[in-house]
Amino acid sequence: QVQLVESGGGSVQAGASLKLSCVASEYSSTWYALGWFRQGPGKEREFVAAITGYGGISYYADSVKDRFIVSRENDKNTVHLQMNSLKPEDTAIYYCARAKDGSGSHYQDDYIYWGQGTQVTVSS
């Protein structure tokens, strides 16, 4: 069982930045794609960003493209989500997840292990 633990959430004003981190319990997670998803109040969970195994390619939802950056430190089993120019609509619980293979995916069904989530609140 792979465990994922997110950190870095908080409450900020619109326009601010936050950096989320997620540590995986297994070194083998290096090969697998890692993704970030979020669930806002009263909304379904949605894709935010993903990075392929070994970090070759990144993918982003249109709503966060050019504002968020996903990266990974394979030697630390860690994936980050740098969030810039935050907007109130970014308010959500953010989850990291490990995919079933090394390719990045937008689909939640392609992710097997999930963290507990970290709350991000952006006020106007």
Image: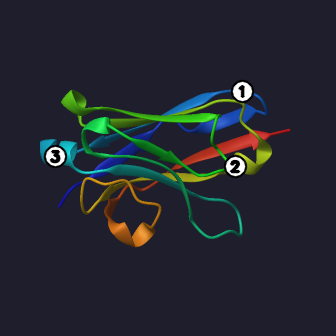
Identified at 65% across, 50% down, the residue is: 62
In the image, residue 106 lies at what x, y percent? 47, 61
Q: Earlier in the sequence, mark 3 or mark 2?
A: 3
Which of the two residues, 29 or 22, is positioned nearer the viewer here? Answer: 29
In the rendered structure, the answer to whether residue 22 lies left or right of residue 28 reads: right
In what element is the residue under mark 2? loop
Quarter of image, res 45? bottom right
Identified at 64% across, 35% down, the residue is: 66
Q: Is residue 45 above or below residue 32?
A: below
Q: Is residue 34 above or below residue 15?
A: below
In the image, residue 17 lies at what x, y percent? 65, 27
In what element is the residue under mark 3? loop
- Tell me how far mark 3 sits from mark 2, CA to CA: 29 Å
Question: Label 3 is placed on what type of residue?
Answer: Glu
In what element is the residue under mark 1? loop
Quarter of image, res 78? top left
Q: Residues within 10 Å of mark 3 (few under 14, many from 20)?
A: few
Q: Earlier in the sequence, mark 2 or mark 1?
A: 1
Q: Residues within 10 Å of mark 1 (few under 14, many from 20)?
A: some
The N terminus lies in which quarter of the figure? Answer: bottom left
Name the residue beneath numbered marker 1.
16
- Tell me how far mark 1 sits from mark 3, CA to CA: 32 Å
Q: Residue furthest right?
A: 124
Name the residue beneath numbered marker 2.
91
Colour pattern of the rendering: rainbow
In the rendered structure, the answer to whether residue 94 lies left or right of residue 26 reads: right
In the image, residue 67 lies at what x, y percent? 65, 34
The C terminus lies in which quarter of the figure? Answer: top right
In the image, residue 101 lies at what x, y percent? 24, 59
Name the residue beneath numbered marker 3.
26
> Pointer 1 and pointer 3: residues touching (CB < 8 Å)?
no
- Tell me how far mark 2 sits from mark 1, CA to CA: 12 Å
